[in-house]
Image: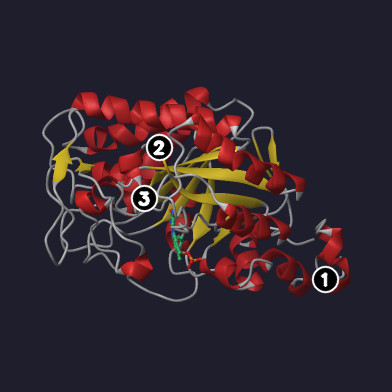
Amino acid sequence: MTALFSSLNLRETSIPNRVMVSPMCQYSCEQRDGLATEWHRTHLGSRAVGGAGLVMSEATAVEPRGRISPEDLGIWSDEHAEALEPITEFIREQGSVPGIQLAHAGRKASTSRPWEDHGPVAPEDGGWTVVGPTDEPWPYDDEAPSTERLTPEDIESVVGSFRTAAERALAAGFEVAEVHAAHGYLIHEFLSPVTNTRGDAYGGGFEGRTRLAREVTAAVREVWPDDKPVFVRISATDWLPDRESWTVADSVRLADRLADLGADLIDVSAGGIHPESSPERAGPNYQVRYAERVREETDREVAVGAVGGITTPEQAEAVVANERADMAIVGREHLRDPYFTLRAAEALDATDEIEGPPQYRRAFGF
Ligand code: FNR
């Protein structure tokens, strides 16, 4: 028996294997309305056909100004939920678990797509005024967009948007809700002392800076059913050792607090808070040791996911078998190969441990 093809049971939800498709923005709402398109259906559907135990949607904005680009997915109306429903249904039909990453891009919102230079989009070109913990903009090379500091009342409204988005995600058929608190987007901007210099209840020390993350997690947990898991993706470190910044020790402390609020899995990524934040190390498993540390050092019952540079079946199996993490989260390799999990079953001699689509049986031998 392999570790990778054992199920992971979180609350009453059984994830059939330990491979998760990492959330990956597709920038493909061509109408700029946040509504899922045929691209999303095919993209997410193929990865479910490919056998991943959990297919996580891309960062899905809880309000229009929370989109990274105007072409991002959103879930700020019932119409958005309805557009996602056939996708979750198809993912479930494949025996996979549909998850949604609920997101707000904060001061890194309103940018063009990566293949269109990823620079700020001005309001007159379909962009918008972005928001953050302070009015300091992301340090763009060129002219920075106007950035507004959120007031406590605005923050309450953002927390409410996450709550309503979770309700809609549930109606759309998702079984896992993931709060995006990583990569320099809004919640991470509040967590990190690099970006959060507020003097009020949402700034200052650890309690203040983690307040938004805790309030959002609690709000999502409040409306997400008791039998279904909530994940939180964090950046374990800001990768800025030469200045006061968010550290792995902070992440362990936060993981404890989030677990107390009912988070079931901490999805451990890193970086994104500042242009100078860059990986200490690249290549295979480049972030796995942060997941391992959170898993080892938290004293709560909380699962941990590892992401970053996991590209081979053997690596994924080793991450889980060596108890470095409970899930192997695979991003770019899933862009190269939607059938990563089916291929992993073959490579690990585990085709009898996976259901697999009968339509593809003659190719894969399960
Ligand atoms: C990403 N990543 C990402 N992360 C996230 O939390 N939400 C998102 O919507 C996106 N979007 C996204 C789009 C694309 C095209 C890529 C390549 C990446 C980061 C991704 O989930 C993952 O954490 C990293 O790619 C590292 O994992 P891999 O690719 O080394 O397995």
Front residue of this view, candidates 25 and 230: 25
Distance (Cα) linking label 1 and label 2? 39 Å
Q: Disc 3 versus disc 2: distance between alpha carbons?
A: 15 Å
What separation in Å lies between label 3 and label 1 (alpha carbons)?
Answer: 36 Å
Image height of 115 relative to 199, above or below = below
Q: Which residue is mark 2?
A: 62
Marks 1 and 2 in Cβ contact (< 8 Å)? no
Q: Which residue is mark 1?
A: 364
Question: Does the numbered disc 2 mark a residue whose Cβ is under 8 Å from ligand 1?
Answer: no
Of callouts 3 and 1, the N-terminal one: 3
Q: Is residue 212 left or right of residue 4?
A: left
Q: Which residue is mark 3?
A: 182
- Where is the C terminus found, in terms of image quarters? bottom right
- Which numbered disc, 1 or 2, marks the residue that appears first in the sequence? 2
Q: Classify 10 Å Cα crowding around label 1: few (below 14), some (14-19), many (20 and above).
A: some
Q: Is residue 141 left or right of residue 220?
A: left
The image quadrant in which ligand 1 is located: bottom left
Measured as percent of width and height from the top left, residue 224 is found at 54, 28
Given this view, does label 3 or label 2 mark the residue nearer the observer? 2
Q: Residue at x 17, y 54 (%)?
A: 244
Tag 3's secondary structure? loop
Q: Tell me which amino acid carries mark 2.
A: Val
Amino acid, disc 3: Ala
Residue 278 vs residue 46, the one in the foreground = 46
Q: Position of residue 344 (x, y in %)?
A: 71, 69
